């Protein structure tokens, strides 16, 4: 294992790396510990990175800017802490992408996991910082402005910024959490469901706040809660499944074939998918392993510039003729 520490400008945040000493390219996990933006909790950093490392990932722990600056995180004023932490998160993610070859990782398969304030930072980095990790893994995430105002944070209105282009989300929490009410994760789940966006949520009936792994590695043991880890591994695997993973009823997509039909739904229609494979072979190939792509309407690919020819009007007409 190659274990080295990198200082990230401009705030001097710390990125601790756990990289397998072999040539094979790995998926990556970027860890954001919690700590109420006061410090980065040790039990939600290194132990988590080590467990994902043992599961075959190359892992990285970010100690981002906090108000107390303990445990290696840079110290900043309370009124500046969120902006500085968000800058650290974005810099860490892009540093990994820019140094993917050095760290032996796939730059398109970097997932972010956060706990408590670190989970808030993780989803903020996606909704405000526009990061695009493979997926988000969120432990007992606080997300509402009401919850974050208790920490002196400014209103971010994150729940109203949920959008269909964000990565799939995995959530785990405890119903009895005395610091971050379980309703916080449930609000996020509801917002994701309304957007028909891929997510998974596990709410455990026992255990309080800050359990991290729920094993001796991280502190307090809770065997039921600790099952979130294996479920998270399955989630990461499933969102890269060769089978369509899209939310909602397929019937509307298939009964009204058009460029507004989702790519994953078109895979279920033999003639439509044959047409896509003939017109857009690169897209068809990528869709077999890219859940995010499969969940989007064909029109969105035109808007992104991924496909341009034939025109969207021509393809729309072709699809409508297949009904």
Image: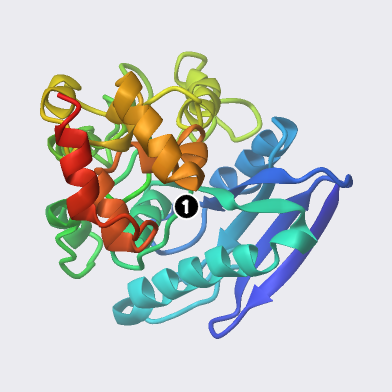
Would residue 33 be visible to someone looking at this image? Answer: yes
Query: Going by the image, does 321 lie left or right of 279?
Result: left
Above/below status of 314 relative to 155: above
Q: Is residue 187 left or right of residue 2?
A: left
Judged from the image, the secondary structure of the residue bearing numbered disc 1 is loop
Across and down, in percent, residue 282 comes to: 51, 46
In this rendering, the answer to whether 114 lies above or below 258 is below
Query: Residue 192 appears at what percent x and percent y?
Result: 21, 39
Residue drawn 35% across and 76% down?
Answer: 83
Residue in front for this viewpoint, 231 or 11: 231
Expressed as whole percent of the image width and height from the top left, the position of residue 312 reads 22, 54
Q: Nearer the viewer, residue 1 or 257?
A: 257
Instruction: Provide residue 209's location: percent of width, then percent of height.
Output: 37, 36
Query: Residue 139, can we see it?
Result: no
Q: Looking at the image, what colour scheme do you see?
A: rainbow
Among all residues in the image, which is located at the extreme right?
A: 22
Label 1: few (<14), some or many (≥20) within 10 Å? many
Nearest the camera: 219 or 127? 127
Q: Residue at x 51, y 67 (%)?
A: 64
Q: Where does label 1 land, which residue? A: 133
Q: Quadrant of the C terminus?
A: top left
**Toward which corner of the image does residue 204 lie, by quadrant?**
top left
Residue 95, compared with residue 318, is above or below; it is below
Q: Nearer the viewer, residue 20 or 6?
A: 20
Q: Residue at x 78, y 50 (%)?
A: 19
């Amino acid at each position: 294992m190659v274990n080295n520490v990198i200082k990230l400008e401009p705030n001097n945040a710390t990125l601790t790396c756990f990289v397998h000493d072999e040539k094979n390219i790995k998926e990556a996990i970027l860890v954001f510990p919690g700590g109420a933006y006061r410090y980065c909790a040790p039990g939600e950093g290194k132990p988590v990175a080590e467990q994902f490392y043992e599961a075959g990932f190359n892992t990285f722990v970010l100690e981002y800017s906090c108000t107390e600056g303990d445990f290696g995180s840079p110290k900043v004023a309370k009124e500046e802490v969120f902006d500085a932490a968000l800058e650290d998160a974005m810099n860490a993610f892009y540093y990994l992408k820019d140094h993917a070859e050095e760290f032996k990782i796939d730059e398109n398969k970097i997932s972010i996991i956060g706990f408590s304030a670190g989970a808030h930072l993780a989803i903020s980095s996606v909704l405000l910082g526009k990061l695009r990790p493979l997926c988000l893994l969120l432990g007992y995430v606080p997300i509402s402005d009401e919850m974050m105002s208790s920490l002196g944070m400014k209103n971010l209105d994150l729940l109203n910024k949920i959008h269909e282009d964000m990565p799939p989300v995995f959530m785990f929490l405890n119903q009895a959490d005395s610091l971050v009410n379980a309703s916080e994760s449930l609000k996020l789940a509801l917002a994701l469901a309304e957007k028909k966006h891929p997510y998974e949520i596990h709410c455990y009936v026992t255990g309080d706040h800050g359990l991290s792994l729920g094993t001796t590695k991280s502190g307090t043991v809770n065997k039921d809660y600790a099952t979130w880890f294996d479920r998270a591994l399955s989630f990461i695997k499933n969102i890269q499944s060769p089978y369509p993973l899209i939310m909602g009823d397929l019937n509307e997509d298939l009964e009204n074939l058009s460029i507004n039909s989702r790519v994953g739904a078109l895979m279920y229609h033999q003639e439509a998918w044959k047409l896509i494979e003939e017109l857009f072979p690169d897209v068809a190939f990528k869709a077999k392993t890219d859940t995010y792509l499969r969940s989007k309407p064909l029109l969105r690919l035109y808007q992104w510039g991924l496909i341009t020819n034939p025109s969207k009007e021509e393809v729309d007409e072709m699809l409508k003729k297949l009904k």
